[in-house]
């Protein structure tokens, strides 16, 4: 009887310990972001100037960025600096995340988890860089082309930042497809055979997604649609090497018996 009373208490202590550890990890990660923010803030004008370079290069002569709200410039610089602060703090954030989830992983999962985590970060930044250096110039050239003698292009700081972040995040997360595929196969939620059978739907869905997210020009839509399809194919190839967790648990149980 005493055992049945002790078990819930022990589970409660374990849950409380996990919550306290999670709190500690989050505080350390947020502290790293704050340090990164403070380090980047003195360079806020240069950072924003670099971000708007693709638009500035295609703006007609006489056009420039403006802000229509007294606090718009301040908050725009604040958001940009916070973003850079988070990017600077990524090594610390990744370490805190790794240290928290490692105890709950199988030994085989620990070997591949950190490389997979690094791969996901690389793919996200690669997708964001692909968007910034290739898609931005083409998209902005198309959009600014609607300016005329009667309609002057004068983008606001706030609207540009929101538009740019939408594209950066869309491309960054789209490039995560291989990692998502491997994770779903590992959890047993999908199979490689099922992924192969849905190729045509992913191909069509990728271009529909591109049409909804990117500017209304064919070039930028193709530059997102085709990578989504190619990354899905890469996900199939990589997932074929992943063993579902349920199969590994069954094999472990058989070995122990």
Image (cartoon, grey):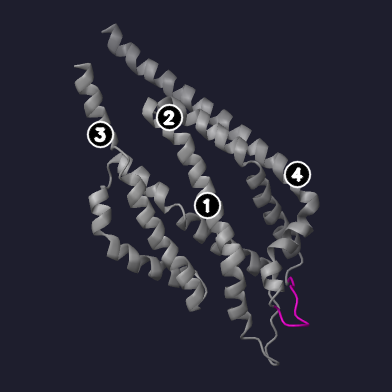
The residue labelled by disc 1 is 124
Badge 1, how many Cα within 10 Å: few under 14, some, many 20+?
A: many
* Image coords of residue 108 (percent x, y): 37, 28
The residue labelled by disc 3 is 246
Local SS, label 2? helix
Local SS, label 1? helix
For the residues marked 2 and 1, what is the alpha-carbon distance in whole angstroms? 22 Å
Whichever of callouts 2 and 1 sits on the residue coming sooner in the sequence is: 2
For the residues marked 4 and 3, what is the alpha-carbon distance in whole angstroms? 46 Å
Do residues under tags 1 and 3 come within 8 Å of each other at their CB atoms? no
Instruction: Classify residue 242 as left or right of residue 128.
Output: left
> Vertically, is 192 above or below 112?
below
Q: Which residues are magenta?
A: 59-67
Quadrant of the snapshot with the C terminus: top left
The residue labelled by disc 2 is 110
Whichever of callouts 4 and 3 sits on the residue coming sooner in the sequence is: 4
Image quadrant in which you'd find residue 45: bottom right
Whichever of callouts 3 and 2 sits on the residue coming sooner in the sequence is: 2
Whichever of callouts 2 and 4 sits on the residue coming sooner in the sequence is: 4
The residue labelled by disc 4 is 38
Please state which of the two labelled residues, at mark 1 or mark 4, is closer to the viewer.
1
Which of these two is toward me, 109 or 211?
109
Residue at image coords 47%, 55%: 175
Badge 4, how many Cα within 10 Å: few under 14, some, many 20+?
A: some
Do residues under tags 3 and 2 come within 8 Å of each other at their CB atoms? no
> Vertically, is 81 above or below 50?
above
Please state which of the two labelled residues, at mark 2 or mark 4, is closer to the viewer.
2
Badge 2, how many Cα within 10 Å: few under 14, some, many 20+?
A: some
């Amino acid at each position: 009887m005493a055992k049945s009373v002790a078990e819930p208490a022990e589970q409660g202590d374990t849950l409380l310990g996990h919550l306290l550890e999670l709190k500690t990890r989050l505080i350390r990660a947020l502290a790293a972001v704050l340090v990164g923010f403070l380090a980047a803030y003195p360079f806020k004008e240069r950072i924003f100037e670099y971000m708007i370079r693709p638009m500035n290069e295609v703006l007609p002569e006489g056009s420039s960025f403006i802000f229509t709200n007294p606090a718009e410039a301040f908050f725009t610089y604040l958001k940009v600096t916070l973003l850079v602060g988070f990017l600077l703090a990524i090594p610390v954030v990744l370490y805190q995340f790794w240290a928290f989830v490692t105890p709950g992983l199988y030994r085989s999962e620990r070997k591949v988890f950190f490389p997979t985590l690094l791969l996901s970060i690389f793919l996200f930044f690669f997708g964001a860089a692909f968007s910034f250096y290739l898609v931005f110039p083409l998209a902005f050239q198309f959009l600014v082309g609607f300016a005329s003698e009667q309609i002057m292009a004068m983008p606001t700081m706030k609207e540009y930042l929101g538009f740019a972040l939408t594209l950066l995040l869309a491309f960054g997360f789209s490039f995560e497809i291989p990692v998502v595929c491997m994770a779903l196969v590992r959890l047993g939620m999908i199979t490689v055979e099922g992924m192969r059978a849905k190729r045509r739907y992913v191909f069509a869905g990728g271009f529909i997604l591109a049409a909804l997210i990117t500017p209304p020009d064919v070039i930028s839509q193709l530059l997102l649609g085709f990578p989504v399809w190619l990354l899905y194919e890469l996900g199939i190839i990589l997932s074929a090497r992943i063993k579902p967790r349920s199969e590994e648990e069954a094999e472990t149980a058989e070995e122990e018996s």
